[in-house]
Amino acid sequence: MGIISVEQVDHLYWLGRYTERVYSTLKLFAKSYDIMIDDSSDIYTNYCKSLDIPDIYKSQEDFLNRYPFDETIMDSIISNLNRAYDNAIVLRETIGSDALSYIQMAIYAMNNAARSDSPLIELQQITDDILSFWGSVDDQIDAEQIRNIIKAGKRIERIDLYARLKIDRKDIEREVKRMIPRVLRSGIKYNEAALSRVSTLINEADIDYSKVIYSVEAIIA
C-alpha cells in the first residue's frame, strides 16, 4: 500500500466511527426494545437524552418505528449505517470487496427489519455483519496503518458513547487503553493534549463524563 491520501484517511476514520455507532446503538436499542414494548411510559425520552440526540418522537411506538428505520432522521440507525456505506464504497479498492460486502449485507438486513413485524432477528443480523466486517478488516487488509485508522475511529466512537451513557469506569479504561496505541500508530494528525487529557480524566476519583466527551472528540478534529 502506498501513501494514504488525506481524503482516504478521513473516510477510513469515519468508517470506523460509523460502524461502531451502528453496532453500539443497535445493541442498546435491542436491549431496550422489549422494555419499551411492555412499558407504556416514555422510556424512549431517556434513551434520546442519554445519547444526546433530539427527541422528535410523538410516542414510544413512533420511536420504535422511526428511530431504527427512518432515513430522514439524521440520528437514526439507518442514517448512520448509510454513512458507513458511503465511506466504505469510496474505499472499495482500499478495504476490499469482501469488507464492503458486509456493510452492504447490513443494509439489506436493515431493509428486511423495516418490513418485519418482529425486527429484532434482522437487527441482530446487522450486528453480526458489522462484526464480520471488522473481522474481514483484520484478516484481509495487510496495511497496518489502514487497520489502525479504522480502529482508532472505532475506539474513539465507543469511548464517546460510553461516556454519554456513563458506563462503568473499568469499561471506559479498557477502551482508552485500546484506543491510544491505535491513534499513535495510525499516522493521523492528532491533538496530543486531548489524548493525554482523556487518560487523566478517567483516572480521577469522580469522572466528569462531559469533559471526557469533549476531550475524546478533540483528539482528531
Image: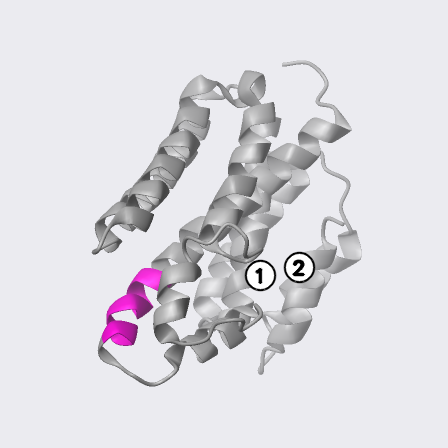
Earlier residue among tags 1 and 2: 1
Q: Residue at x 56, y 38 (%)?
A: 15
Which amino acid, mark 2?
A: Val
Q: Is residue 143 left or right of residue 22?
A: right
Asked if one can make out residue 178 in the rendered structure from this viewpoint, the answer is yes
- Judge by depth and name the residue closer to the eye, 32 or 1: 32
Q: Is residue 1 magenta?
A: no
Asked if one can make out residue 135 in the rendered structure from this viewpoint, the answer is no
Determine the secondary structure under disc 1. Answer: helix
- Judge by depth and name the residue closer to the eye, 77 or 201: 77
Tag 1 and tag 2, C-beta contact below 8 Å: yes
Q: Can you identify the residue that label 1 sits on? A: 160
Q: Is residue 146 left or right of residue 122?
A: right
Q: Is residue 33 magenta?
A: yes
Residue 216: which disc?
A: 2
Instruction: Determine whether 187 is above or below 199 in the image.
Output: above
Determine the secondary structure under disc 2. Answer: helix
- Judge by depth and name the residue closer to the eye, 202 or 46: 46
Residue 137's x, y, as percent?
46, 28
> Dividing the image into 4 quarters, which one contains the N terminus?
top right
Residue 126's x, y, as percent?
34, 43
Residue 23's x, y, as percent?
41, 50
- Judge by depth and name the residue closer to the eye, 201 or 118: 118
Which amino acid, mark 1?
A: Asp
Residue count near mark 1 (Cα–Cα under 10 Å), binned few <14, some 14–19, many ≥20: many
Magenta extent:
29-37
Residue count near mark 2 (Cα–Cα under 10 Å), binned few <14, some 14–19, many ≥20: many
